[in-house]
Amino acid sequence: MKNSSKNFIKKTAMLAVFLGLFLAGCGSAGYRHITVVEHVPYEVEVPIHTPSPMPSPIPIATPLPTPSPTPEPTPTPEPSFADIWLEKLTVEEKIGQLIMPRLVWQTTAPCPEVTAWVAHYGFGGIILFGDNVYSIAQVQAMSAALQAASPYLPLFIAIDEEGGRVSRVGRLFDWQIPAAYSILATIKCDCFGADNCEHRCVNFHAQANREAARLAHETGQRLTTLGINMNFAPVADVWTNPANTVIGNRAFSRDPYAAAEMVATTIYGLQRENIFAVAKHFPGHGDTYEDSHFNLAFYPHDRARFDTVEAIPFIRAIEAGVDGIMVGHISTPQLRGSAPILCWKQDAFENGWLPATFSDFWLQDVLRGEMGFEGLIVTDALDMRALTDHFTPEQIAVGAFLAGADILLMPTHPDRAFYALLDAFREGLITLERLEASVRRVLYAKADILP
């Protein structure tokens, strides 16, 4: 009976525990009810709750690589002004761009004959002289009429306006710009004495450069007013031969470095007024005796002399961004380069009197190659006796162009020069690549004078 009583109590306790667990599971949500059994004489075995195992973590997918953005297509550059016109122009029109005749003698009005002549050949430019000039209004009207006569591209309207004795339009204005060499004479020397200033005084040179810049700026304003856009200046020759009268006081100095800085400031002053500056007369006319208007001029020195004297102002002009360089009709017996490709040049080459105008050594090897000049190479006037006494108009035109010139200035017969170049092209002597190299330089410059 004792055992039966104990079993009864045990069963009753277990029933109470189960009832408590059941009620806890049926209680209000969020709460847990626990039933406490009192007066249980022995330890009640309560089942231990084993938590369910945590589910395996969901594997993280390997991220897909971010696709690289599709590169934007490189935009095709817009064709340049030169590219557009190289495609448009015929061979004949390209050749016309290389020729710059002088305006007919004493022509002062835009007569039909002149405008028709310009339009027919499609000349790239015209040079004016004093006989074409009598008033500001007249030059303005004539410049505008010439531009209007050009069939498709603007013209270079050029002039020699150096100041001093080489001045075509100076008389139209209130005062005449002085000769280049006289600028030095106007500068007061206050450091070493008159004999040493030109070579040693920094302040002297600074004043001279400022004056050269001022005069160039004034010249540029005058030319712009007249409708002229190209000036065959400054003179970059070094006047080392006092007996040389063709250059003389047209040069800035006898010192190459003083001349070089004044050349540079003159270029800046002209370009500031949108005038194309053309430095002259490469490879140097300052130590010759002869006047190439009447005779072939000779430069008697070697390469070392050229590099240390005559070359200095031209190098500085290139550094200053000069638009063009004019080549003079100057023979250099000690500096010849390779034999010419045209047989009619051979005798002049072998005997040391081939002009630089016809020398690919001077124009391509030295000026383009060594000096790195990329602008326009312009011949001096092709009607000078330094050339016409020895060569035909056809030889002059083709010889200068094949040597490396871009603009043929003042051929004696512009029509014969035109057809000589055209015939040379048709015969294969002038390649399309060579022709377009010069035309591209002309077009590149003309992009800056579009209306």
Image (spheres, rainbow, N blue to C red):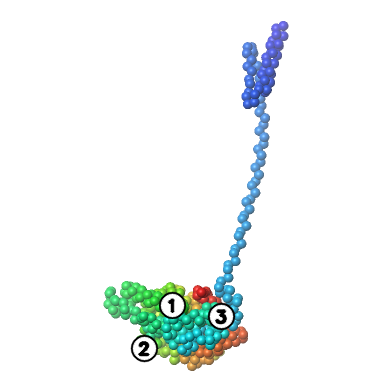
In front: 276, or 62?
A: 276
- Residue 341 seen in the current view: no
The earlier-in-sequence mark between 1 and 2 is 1
Say few, some or many: other residues with alpha carbon within 10 Å of mark 2 (under 14 / 14 to 19 / 20 or more): some
Q: Residue at x 67, y 31 (%)?
A: 53
Picture layout, residue 66 above or below residue 387: above
Q: Earlier in the sequence, mark 3 or mark 1?
A: 3
Inspect the image, locate mark 2, and give the three-letter code of the amino acid beneath it.
Answer: Ala
Residue 25 visible to an observer of this rendering: yes
**Helix, strand or loop under label 1:** helix
Name above or below for residue 70 compared with residue 448.
Answer: above
In x, y percent, where is residue 41? Answer: 64, 12
* Left or right position of 269 against 426: left
Which residue is the site of mark 2?
A: 243
Looking at the rendered structure, which numbered label has been put on residue 151? 3
Where residue 305 appears, x then y in whole percent? 41, 81
Q: Is residue 276 above or below residue 412?
A: above
Residue mark closest to the camera, 1 vs 2 = 1
Question: Which kind of residue does numbered mark 3 sit on?
Answer: Pro
Give the labeled residue for mark 1: 225
Instruction: Tell me which residue sits at (52%, 78%) in the image.
Output: 154
Answer with left or right where residue 197 lies relative to residue 402: left
Q: Is residue 396 above or below residue 218?
A: below
